[in-house]
């Protein structure tokens, strides 16, 4: 068994209760050994401890436990000193009436920028309208402006979930649901598989208690059996690999995260017998060639299940995940999944963007070229990550606005809809619902009636006025930019023509 972090291959064990605040421990977990970096974190530690001195968490613990835990996780992820300092300070603006200018004076522009970013993210609360979840995710990514802001927010959320049992029940559910639908998918987009899994598993029991209990039961029943097969395979495999002259860097037994097991069970009528990767054996090797050779060795000893061999090295998953997967008959009635990857692929799968943002020893932060327009969309983030995998020039690129060509518009209820730059109230109306578009009579932007060709700006609150008599005008086609609106308008005009 082992765990790897970008900072230190021996750290970052599965999450348990966080240790009590301890400056020496935090400094020890930091990747950077430079005295400036350590002094910065040390000062932020003292500042945060003092600023939160009078406040307590719902758990009754000192509030500082929370900001310390957030920072400790960031250190374990291998983040740089400024991000760790910002983790310590992330709640002082909101909760302790400390001014941003004070932070800037004490800790510099960058730390102040990161703290303000996290504070801004905190102002939006998701109320659980699933059709808008994707817009909310994009909105948060756009507001963050820097991936480190999101990583701090995710670390903050992780500790909040670990202590969620102390929070009022209605609030508890809202936070857990927001995590499942907004923050865990963001962690996934950023490629931080470990964090995504932890966020989901901590939220799961609060959002779906019955399903949680059922999944725990199913896993318990099947998990033990699986582990037995995997252990046997592991022993034989070590022998076979040694004979073939292959030396794995590490092998690891992993149990599928509970929430992702539940997602899979749902697709298979809750039949656990149909799920082969409840547990898997992971083999980490030095080179890609070793990976393919290991797959060959495995298949020469055990018969693979047809259709279960997956080459995500040649064809990575959309989020950049790479590995070879195979499922084998273990010979005693058992079935086992084996995942084969290089150390680099492993780091990438567990830590994603954090692995790239992690403090690079000696190099510090380096400045790179601005990203081109093709990175204007977060779906391309993983593509972008891949392109920069071999480069050390990350920081500047992360500050680029991914969303230059999108605007984020609020409904009167506070839901967010994202539209291309140049979109008008008619585009917005159709994005809400085709009926709202078809019955469009006018629009109020920030409370004022406006003409239908007005271009919407990010942050506008738009209310559509509809009428009973729905008449779609061909003129509207001149004032829309989304293909969705265009499609609905044309279809409505077509219907009218037929009727006439
Ligand atoms: Mn916080």
Image: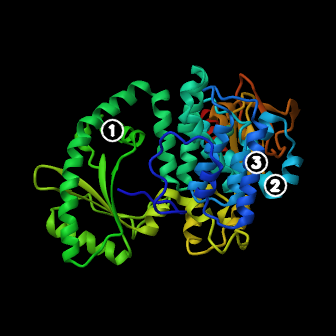
Please report whichever mark, 1 or 2, sits nearer to the chain's N-terminal start.
Answer: 2
Image coordinates for residue 357, horizontal then vertical, percent: 62, 63
Q: Position of residue 358 (x, y in %)?
A: 61, 63
Q: Residue under circle 3?
A: 115
Determine crowd level at label 3: few under 14, some 14-19, many 20+ residues with C-alpha closer than 10 A: many
Q: Quadrant of ligand 1?
A: top right
Mark in the foreground, 1 or 3: 3
- Write the residue at 35% across / 36% down: 266
Is residue 426 at least partly visible in the picture?
Answer: no
Q: Which dot marks residue 107?
A: 2
For mark 3, give the secondary structure.
helix
Which structural element holds mark 2? helix
Label 3 near label 1: C-beta < 8 Å?
A: no
**Closer to the camera, 123 or 237?**
237
Q: How many marks?
A: 3
* Closer to viewer: mark 3 or mark 2: 2
- Tell me the mark number nearer the camera, choosing from 1 and 2: 2
On the image, numbered disc 1 is attached to which residue? 265
Q: Going by the picture, which residue comes out furthest to the left?
A: 332
Element under label 1? helix
Which residue shows up at 86% across the image and 38% down it?
A: 451
Q: Quadrant of residue 48?
A: top right
Name the disc covering residue 309, or none: none
């Amino acid at each position: 068994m082992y765990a790897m972090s970008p900072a230190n291959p021996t750290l970052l064990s599965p999450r348990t209760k966080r240790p009590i605040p301890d400056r020496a421990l935090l400094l020890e977990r930091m990747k950077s050994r430079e005295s400036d970096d350590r002094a910065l974190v040390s000062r932020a530690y003292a500042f945060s401890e003092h600023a939160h001195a009078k406040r307590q968490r719902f758990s009754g613990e000192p509030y500082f436990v929370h900001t310390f835990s957030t920072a400790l996780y960031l250190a374990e992820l291998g983040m740089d000193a400024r991000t760790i300092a910002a983790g310590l300070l992330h709640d002082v603006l909101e909760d302790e009436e400390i001014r941003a200018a004070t932070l800037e004076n004490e800790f510099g522009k960058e730390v102040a920028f990161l703290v303000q970013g996290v504070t801004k993210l905190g102002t939006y609360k998701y109320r659980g309208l699933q059709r808008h979840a994707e817009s909310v995710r994009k909105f948060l990514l756009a507001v963050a402006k820097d991936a480190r802001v999101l990583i701090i927010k995710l670390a903050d959320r992780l500790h909040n979930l670990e202590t969620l049992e102390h929070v009022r029940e209605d609030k508890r559910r809202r936070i857990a649901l927001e995590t499942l639908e907004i923050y865990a998918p963001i962690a996934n987009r950023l490629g931080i598989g470990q964090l995504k899994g932890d966020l989901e598993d901590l939220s799961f029991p609060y959002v779906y208690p019955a399903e949680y209990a059922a999944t725990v039961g199913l896993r318990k029943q099947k998990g033990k059996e699986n582990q037995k097969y995997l252990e046997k395979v592991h022993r034989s495999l070590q022998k076979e690999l040694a004979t073939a002259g292959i030396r794995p860097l590490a092998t690891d037994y992993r149990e599928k995260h509970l929430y992702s097991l539940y997602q899979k069970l749902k697709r298979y009528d809750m039949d656990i017998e149909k799920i082969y990767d409840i547990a898997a054996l992971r083999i980490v090797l030095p080179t890609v060639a070793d990976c393919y050779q290991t797959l060959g060795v495995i298949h020469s000893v055990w018969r693979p299940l047809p259709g279960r061999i997956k080459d995500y090295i040649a064809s990575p998953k959309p989020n950049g995940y790479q590995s070879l997967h195979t499922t084998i008959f273990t010979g005693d009635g058992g079935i086992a999944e084996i995942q084969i990857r290089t150390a680099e692929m492993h780091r990438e799968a567990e830590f994603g963007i954090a692995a790239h943002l992690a403090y690079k020893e000696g190099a510090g932060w380096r400045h790179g070229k601005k990203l081109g327009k093709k990175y204007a969309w977060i779906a391309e983030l993983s593509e972008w990550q891949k392109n920069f995998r071999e480069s050390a020039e990350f920081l500047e690129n992360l500050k680029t606005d991914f969303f230059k060509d999108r605007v984020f518009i609020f409904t009167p209820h506070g839901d967010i809809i994202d539209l291309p730059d140049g979109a008008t109230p008619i585009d917005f109306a159709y994005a809400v619902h085709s009926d709202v578009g078809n019955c469009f009579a006018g629009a109020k932007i920030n409370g004022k009636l406006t003409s239908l060709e007005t271009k919407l700006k990010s942050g506008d609150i738009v209310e559509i006025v509809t009428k009973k008599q729905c008449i779609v005008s061909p003129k509207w086609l001149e004032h829309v930019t989304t293909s969705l609106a265009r499609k609905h308008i044309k279809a409505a005009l077509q219907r009218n023509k037929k009727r006439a």
